[in-house]
Amino acid sequence: MNQISAKRRKAFVDEAYCVACGCCVKVCPLKAITVFKGITARVDRERCVGCGKCAKECPASVITIQEAAL
Amino acid sequence: MKKRWYDYLWIASAVYLILGFFNILFTWLGLLCFFIPLIMAIIGKDKGYCNRYCGRGQLFSLIGGRFGLSRKKDVPRWLKSKWFRYGFLIFFFAMFFQMLWTTWLVFSGATDLKQVVTLLWTFKLPWHWAYYGGTAPWVAQFAFGFYSVMLTSTILGLLTMVLFKPRSWCVYCPMGTMTQLICKARGAVNSKR
Ligand code: SF4
Ligand code: SF4
Ligand code: SF4
């Protein structure tokens, strides 16, 4: 049980290719992703539940959902 | 999610494109889509325009997303590469200045007003029905040129919307690239301090 919950799926942004359009922000149900100073999107790992809505919406397809060690 | 007033700005974008078919002088309003993003990037210090107010982006997500007119495939890697995005920005600027130059030629009397809308910088469409006179010729020339820019970018945006994700245009949109560059430049300057 513990071993399973030790890893969670989270969104990761490839910041080098993010165009800071904010499409991901609009669809995130948990407000877990924001555009930092107009430069790139950033994920709040505490809030993100890895639902993948942002990844689906991102026009540049720079978000991936990966297992993250907590 | 709760809709805000600015979630309906796509209506303004659609109305703008339609008005250009009836009265070309309305297209001067499009300057707002150039100055507001820049002001927001310079004074507001973020991409507030893209992130909240851009009606064009909303229009693409509506047609491509809600109405499903999009393959929803990933954009090819070159489209999001820096050289393509910056290259397109430079190309767009060059075309913009050429448009200003044409306006200047008409203003100075060197050439006559041409009542055409140029699509994709190549195809010239007669558009005389949308101009009724009553202004200085250069005012109309600028309006025709500006509308050409707006319509061309809409066509490119629709094309990439259908081929790739709904808002693929935002990946290489010159205004988006420019405002992000401004924000990045400020970030770089601030981090040096
Ligand atoms: S949708 Fe994609 S490109 Fe746009 S801000 Fe979010 S991560 Fe960046
Ligand atoms: S994966 Fe879901 S919760 Fe996490 S940032 Fe994306 S939309 Fe928000
Ligand atoms: S990138 Fe261009 S089209 Fe997309 S939201 Fe920003 S200004 Fe609008």
Image (cartoon, rainbow, N blue to C red):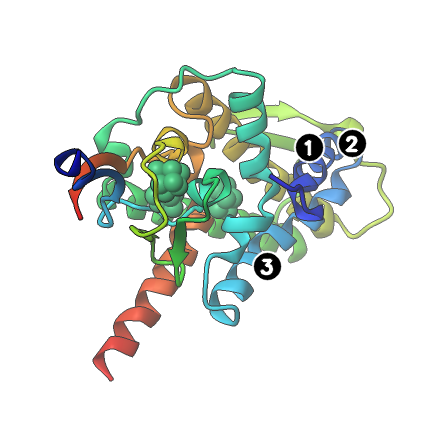
Task: Say whether residue A8 is left or right of residue B135.
Answer: left
Q: Residue at x 49, y 48 (%)?
A: B96
Task: Say whether residue B63 is left or right of residue B185.
Answer: right
Q: Position of residue B137 (x, y in %)?
A: 74, 48
For mark 3, give the secondary structure.
helix
**Image vertical order of residue B20 relative to residue A39, above or below:** above
Task: Say whether residue B189 is left or right of residue B27.
Answer: left
Residue named by callout 1:
B14
Residue named by callout 3:
B36
Q: Callout 3, which amino acid?
A: Ile
Residue named by callout 2:
B130
- Chain bearing tag 1 is B
Residues tagged 2 and 1 counted as in contact (Cβ below 8 A): no
**Image vertical order of residue B62 relative to residue B134, above or below:** above
For mark 1, give the secondary structure.
helix
**Image vertical order of residue A9 relative to residue B165, above or below:** below
Q: Quadrant of residue B60?
A: top right
Q: Residue at x 53, y 30 (%)?
A: B61
- Chain bearing tag 2 is B
Q: Callout 1, which amino acid?
A: Ala
Q: Quadrant of residue A65?
A: top left
For the residues marked 3 and 1, what is the alpha-carbon distance in whole angstroms?
Answer: 18 Å
Same chain, marks 2 and 3?
Answer: yes
Q: Quadrant of the N terminus of chain A?
A: top left
For mark 2, give the secondary structure.
helix
- Chain bearing tag 3 is B
Which corner quadrant of the figure contains ligand 1?
top left
Same chain, marks 3 and 1?
Answer: yes
Q: Which of the pair B126/B1 is nearer the observer?
A: B1
Q: Position of residue B159 (x, y in %)?
A: 45, 21
For the residues marked 2 and 3, what is the alpha-carbon distance in whole angstroms?
Answer: 26 Å
Q: Callout 2, which amino acid?
A: Ala
